[in-house]
């Protein structure tokens, strides 16, 4: 039996257990950086199988499996663990429960086959993907990928049917920074224009100016605002207006230029309207860049596993992912795992309460990650 056949056989053998693990994690969602019960659950499973592991940064876990030639190559495999709030309810609406369950399965498969493998496999169970600056940054600061040759990550993808694998190329996900803007000045009665400043107008012009600077069109950077709080009333101008937004781009140099432009506009608006415009930009994730050499390895593994007709290119997206931190540290690749099933009515999108997966994708995800990890092409 070939190594591929052994991996597939074990993935099928373990599938029911991995489905149960996914369901257990799904029913006990935990916030970013508070995944304490999830971490304990993972550790218990790793202990059952005699897999070496350690805690990192309170809720992160690193499991290490060594083959019979551990120094030949060192492969890092990553899964995220945290849940998100959707309409006020904490839930696994992004698929991190599936990611964690699949990596647990991958660890079990690789451990079962370690005598047939060459290299060291580092399984990263990572906290806090959903919260800036991202748990990946914390893992890197704790040196978990220092010795890795490359890093592989996968994400369930409801835009693809279960059984299909999506391959993004190059810079494929945007950077993401959070904008916090506070406009302050003397408020007062709307009719008494000489006794107050118009903070609402100033904030509106600030947002409008940035819309002119960064018009919404394809392949352009995004500067958009989703929160505008001016707590005045019909005839009262408030002394403070708060605005929150996001900025996204695929180009790191452009990212720096956008930040400069935002601050420049803030100063101009402050001068014109006699207000203070305080801008705080919370730096989030960088852009995610897939390594071209790894793309060949991942694509070959995907075609070998599900067939060429089920492997598709995925266009770059303005959504952000903290796996990007790894891609700026080591050669990395982040691919998409189809999880939808129209016939079964599994069509909900991520970050909605309708999101779900066809659990058959768990087997494909385990097989795909293992095949990629052991490939030496």
Image: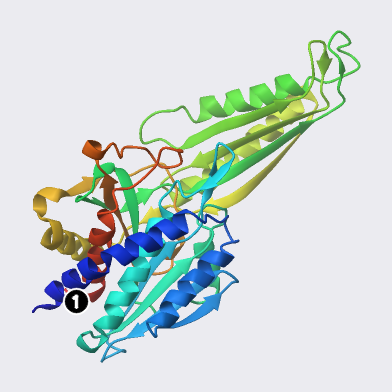
From the viewer's perspective, tell me whether residue 297 is left or right of residue 290. left
Query: Going by the image, does 298 lie left or right of 349?
Result: left
Q: Could you say where residue 310 lies in the image, as x and y percent from the top left?
A: 14, 49
Report crowding for label 1: few under 14, some 14 to 19, many 20 or more residues within 10 A (C-alpha): few
Look at the image and tell me in which quarter the C terminus lies. bottom left
Could you say which quadrant of the image residue 122 lies in?
bottom left
Q: Position of residue 50 (x, y in %)?
A: 39, 85
Q: Give how far across and how far down residue 340 sits, in percent.
A: 28, 43
Locate residue 262 relative to residue 101 in the image: left or right.
right
Question: At x 80% / y 26%, what residue is drawn?
Answer: 274
Name the residue at 47% across, 49% down: 175
Q: Is residue 128 above or below residue 239?
A: below
Does 219 sit above or below residue 282? above
User: Which residue is depicted at the point 17% across and 71% down?
Assistant: 9
User: Is 253 drawn above or below residue 18 in the view shown?
Assistant: above
Residue highlighted by disc 1: 376
Residue closer to the observer: 347 or 300: 347
For the view shown, which residue lies furthest in the top direction? 191
Nearer to me, 366 or 19: 19
Measured as percent of width and height from the top left, residue 151 is found at 35, 69
In the image shown, does 10 or 75 lie closer to the viewer? 10
Which type of secondary structure does the marked residue at label 1 adopt?
Answer: loop
Q: Can residue 83 be seen from the camera position used here?
A: yes
248 relative to 211, above or below? below
* Residue 85, quarter of the rendered image: top right
Q: Does any portion of residue 151 appear in the rendered image?
A: no
């Amino acid at each position: 039996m070939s190594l591929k056949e052994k991996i597939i056989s074990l993935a099928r053998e373990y599938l029911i257990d991995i489905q149960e693990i996914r369901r257990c994690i799904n029913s006990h969602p935990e916030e970013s950086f508070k995944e304490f019960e999830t971490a304990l659950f993972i550790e218990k499973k790793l202990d059952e199988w005699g897999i070496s592991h350690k805690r990192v940064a309170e809720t992160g876990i690193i499991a290490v499996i060594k083959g019979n030639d551990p120094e030949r190559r060192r492969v890092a495999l990553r899964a995220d663990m945290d849940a998100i709030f959707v309409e006020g309810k904490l839930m696994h609406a992004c698929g991190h429960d599936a990611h964690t369950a699949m990596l647990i399965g991958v660890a079990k498969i690789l451990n079962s086959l370690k005598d047939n493998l060459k290299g060291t496999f580092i399984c990263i169970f990572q906290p806090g993907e959903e919260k800036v600056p991202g748990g990946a940054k914390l893992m890197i600061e704790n040196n978990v990928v220092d010795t890795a040759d490359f890093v592989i990550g996968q994400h369930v993808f409801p835009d693809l049917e279960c059984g299909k694998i999506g391959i993004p190329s190059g810079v494929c996900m945007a950077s993401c920074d959070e904008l916090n803007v506070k406009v302050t000045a003397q408020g007062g009665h709307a009719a008494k224009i000489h006794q107050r400043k118009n903070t609402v107008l100033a904030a509106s012009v600030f947002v409008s100016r940035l819309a002119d600077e960064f018009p919404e069109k394809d392949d352009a950077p995004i500067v958009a605002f989703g929160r505008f709080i001016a707590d005045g009333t019909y005839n009262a101008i408030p002394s403070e207006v708060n605005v929150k937004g996001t900025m996204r781009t695929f180009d790191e140099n452009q990212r720096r230029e956008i930040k400069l432009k935002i601050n420049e506009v803030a100063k101009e608006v402050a001068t014109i309207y006699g207000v203070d415009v305080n801008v705080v930009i919370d730096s989030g994730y960088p852009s995610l860049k897939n390594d071209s050499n790894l793309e060949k390895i991942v694509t070959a593994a995907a075609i070998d596993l599900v067939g060429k007709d089920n492997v598709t290119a995925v266009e770059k997206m303005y959504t952000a992912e903290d796996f990007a931190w790894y891609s700026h540290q080591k050669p990395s690749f982040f691919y998409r795992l189809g999880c939808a099933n129209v016939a079964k009515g599994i069509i909900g999108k991520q970050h909605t309460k309708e999101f779900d997966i066809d659990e058959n994708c768990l087997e494909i995800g385990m097989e795909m990650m293992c095949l990629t990890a052991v490939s030496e092409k």
